[in-house]
Image (spheres, rainbow, N blue to C red):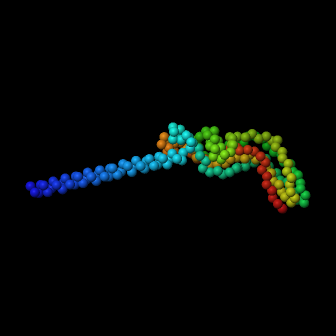
């Protein structure tokens, strides 16, 4: 009898010990897992654009890099070389007429309007998809002595690198595409000088 009692007692202790360890492991895993999910969801919400995570899945566009202004030259360059010791006067005329259109390189897969609005908001400037230029722009400059004046008529284009994405109801982003865009900003004379 002693040997039976001796065998059954450790068996009972082992099952109780296994139950306690399993219970401790289970209660330790659940709160840690739930806490991790909650923390990640709150972090994602804090970096989303206005309207996100409230049923609006997108697509959204964000500007990743601003390359500045790109000059699309349509007329020129013209040069006035003033090698004298007096001021000289020069007039330049744009002779080109036509339409400058936006360009998108890459796979953003979003509407042109959404992309334009996103660039406007990000850069704080007004951009359009195209501009019509007439050939009637004439300008007159005074050129200093011993100076070369260079001039060209150009369409100024906002040049950015952008990302389009959608997101689900818990604010997780999925990239749609990336690409470089150039949108019309304005047209004007672009000049620079070189000294002798």
- Return the residue nearer the eye: 150 or 30: 30
Image side of residue 196 versus residue 38, left or right? right
* Residue nearest the observer in this picture, 163 or 19: 19
Q: x, y percentage for residue 149?
A: 83, 54
> Can you name the residue that lies furthest to the top here?
55
Q: Is residue 61 left or right of residue 142?
A: left
Q: Is residue 77 visible?
A: no
Q: Is residue 60 left or right of residue 145?
A: left
Position in image of residue 42 (x %, y %): 48, 47
Q: Residue at x 86, y 52 (%)?
A: 142
59 over 150 or under it: above or below: above
- For the point 68% across and 40% down, the residue is 129
- Residue depicted at x 59% and y 46%: 62
Disc tally is 0
Residue 78 screen position, x and y as percent: 82, 51
Image height of 48 relative to 144, above or below:
above
Q: Is residue 163 visible?
A: yes
Instruction: Report the residue at 27% width, 52% height from top.
Output: 20
Please identify the residue farthest to the left as the structure is shown.
1
Q: Quarter of the image containing the N terminus?
A: bottom left
Tell which of 36 and 89 is nearer to you: 36
Q: Which sits in the foreground, 148 or 167?
A: 167
Residue 27: x and y in percent read 33, 50
Q: Quadrant of the C terminus?
A: bottom right
């Amino acid at each position: 009898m002693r040997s039976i009692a001796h065998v059954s007692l450790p068996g009972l202790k082992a099952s109780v010990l296994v139950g306690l360890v399993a219970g401790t492991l289970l209660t330790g895993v659940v709160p840690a897992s739930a806490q991790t999910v909650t923390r990640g969801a709150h972090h994602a919400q804090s970096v989303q654009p206005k309207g996100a995570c409230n049923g609006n899945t997108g697509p959204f566009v964000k500007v990743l890099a601003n390359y500045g202004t790109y000059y699309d030259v349509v007329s020129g360059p013209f040069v006035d070389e003033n090698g004298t010791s007096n001021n000289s006067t020069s007039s330049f005329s744009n002779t080109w007429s036509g339409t400058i259109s936006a360009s998108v390189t890459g796979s953003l897969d979003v509407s042109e309007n959404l992309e334009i609005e996103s660039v406007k908001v990000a850069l704080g400037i007004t951009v359009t998809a195209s501009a019509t230029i007439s050939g009637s722009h004439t300008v007159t400059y005074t050129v200093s002595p011993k100076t070369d004046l260079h001039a060209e008529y150009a369409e100024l284009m906002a040049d950015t690198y952008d990302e389009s994405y959608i997101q689900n109801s818990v604010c997780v982003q999925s990239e749609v595409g990336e690409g470089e865009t150039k949108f019309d900003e304005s047209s004007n004379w672009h000049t620079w000088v070189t000294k002798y």
